[in-house]
Image (cartoon, grey):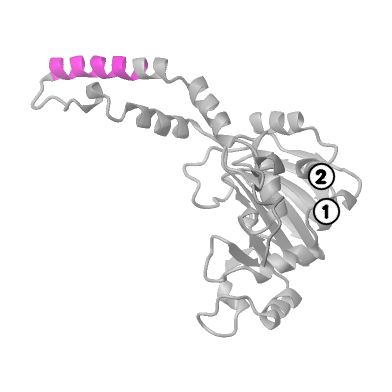
């Protein structure tokens, strides 16, 4: 069984894609998390936590009672990079939530999961872990700037969906939802899967310990196409002509018409479908045993 199949369980990939394409959320009770033992466990999460650098917020972040707290709460001395067991234990007794980001860069299994997921969810993708020691909330109500697919690994987590999905102006922060009206509720048990589209307000609560594994699908957007189109235009002489100096209204209108024709012609020659095709070719495949060339010295006897 592939790691993506272990992650999704009985949830069809096509249904997950359809929900995200329609910007709709979904909850799939899957009846037990036994299939996940070969993917990630609490022991794996603690091992990955020990590898975290508390001075690097891109890899680790914490929150307590719904609010972000500084990573140095996990250390005793200023400047320490490794989390300390005593500090972790004290925080866990009080109740807190940790976010381990980009764990596909640390775990071979999660790296393989990312590569498998990229075959069906084109675009940048990250794998993360969220652990909570309750009772309490994770973050206050917020909306993520990526599509998210999560599977509950251990414990129970209650979710509330707030308002409708909203378009967000950047991907750098977690904004509060524009509507606090609860539009959906569900509870994740071990093995259950949830699909949350980008821009969907939500918040979570746990009564005890909870661990979930998530795919953050950064997606491919029209902005990415425009950036690719700009690269296709680089070096083309027509796009290097200066804007007219001191032009009157008639000259500017003529320049506007010329530039529109140039851009439309560029889009005809480098269409969105051509761009998507180029992305699919870039994904490639994993290295396999057949990619390793034969050892020419394997059959020779080594004499000492």
Q: Nearer the viewer, residue 41 or 146?
A: 41
Secondary structure, magenta segment, majority class: helix
Q: Element at badge 1?
A: loop
The quarter of the picture where residue 87 lies is bottom right
Q: Earlier in the sequence, mark 1 or mark 2?
A: 2
> Is residue 184 among what the camera can see?
no
Pinpoint residue 182: horizontal percent, then vertical percent: 71, 45
In the picture, measured across the screen, residue 99 lies left or right of residue 274, that is: right
Q: Name the foreground residue: 90 vs 286.
A: 286
Q: Quadrant of the C terminus?
A: bottom right
Indicate yes or no whether the magenta region holds residue 161: no
Quarter of the image for residue 179 reads top right
Q: Which residue is mark 1?
A: 38
Quadrant assignment for the N terminus = top right
**Is residue 218 something that shows in the picture?**
yes
Residue 11: quarter of image: top right
Relative to 220, say whether 170 is above or below: below
Tag 1 near tag 2, CB within 8 Å = yes
């Amino acid at each position: 069984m592939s790691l993506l199949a272990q992650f999704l369980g009985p949830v069809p990939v096509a249904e997950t894609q359809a929900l995200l394409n329609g910007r709709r959320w979904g909850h799939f009770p899957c009846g037990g998390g036994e299939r996940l033992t070969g993917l990630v466990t609490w022991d794996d999460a603690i091992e990955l936590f020990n590898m975290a650098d508390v001075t690097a917020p891109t890899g680790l972040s914490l929150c307590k009672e719904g609010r972000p707290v500084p990573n140095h709460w996990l250390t005793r001395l200023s400047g320490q990079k490794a989390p300390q067991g005593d500090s972790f234990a004290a925080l866990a007794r009080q109740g807190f939530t940790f976010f381990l980001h980009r764990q596909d860069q640390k775990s071979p299994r999660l790296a393989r999961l990312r590569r498998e997921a990229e075959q069906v969810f084109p675009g940048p993708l990250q794998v993360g872990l969220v652990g909570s020691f309750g009772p309490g909330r994770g973050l206050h109500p917020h909306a993520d700037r990526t599509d998210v697919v999560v599977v509950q690994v251990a414990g129970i987590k209650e979710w509330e969906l707030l308002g409708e999905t909203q378009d967000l102006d950047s991907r750098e922060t977690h904004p509060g939802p524009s509507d606090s009206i609860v539009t959906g509720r569900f509870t994740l048990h071990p093995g259950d899967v949830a699909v949350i589209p980008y821009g969907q307000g939500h918040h979570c609560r746990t009564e005890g310990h909870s661990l979930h594994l998530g795919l953050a699908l950064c997606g491919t957007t029209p902005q990415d196409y425009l950036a690719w189109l700009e690269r296709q235009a680089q070096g083309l002489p027509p796009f290097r002509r200066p804007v007219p100096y001191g032009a009157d209204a008639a000259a500017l209108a003529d320049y506007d018409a010329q530039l529109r024709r140039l851009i439309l012609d560029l889009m005809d020659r480098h269409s969105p479908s051509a761009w998507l095709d180029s992305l699919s070719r870039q994904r490639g495949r994993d290295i396999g045993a057949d990619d390793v060339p034969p050892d020419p010295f394997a059959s020779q006897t080594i004499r000492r």
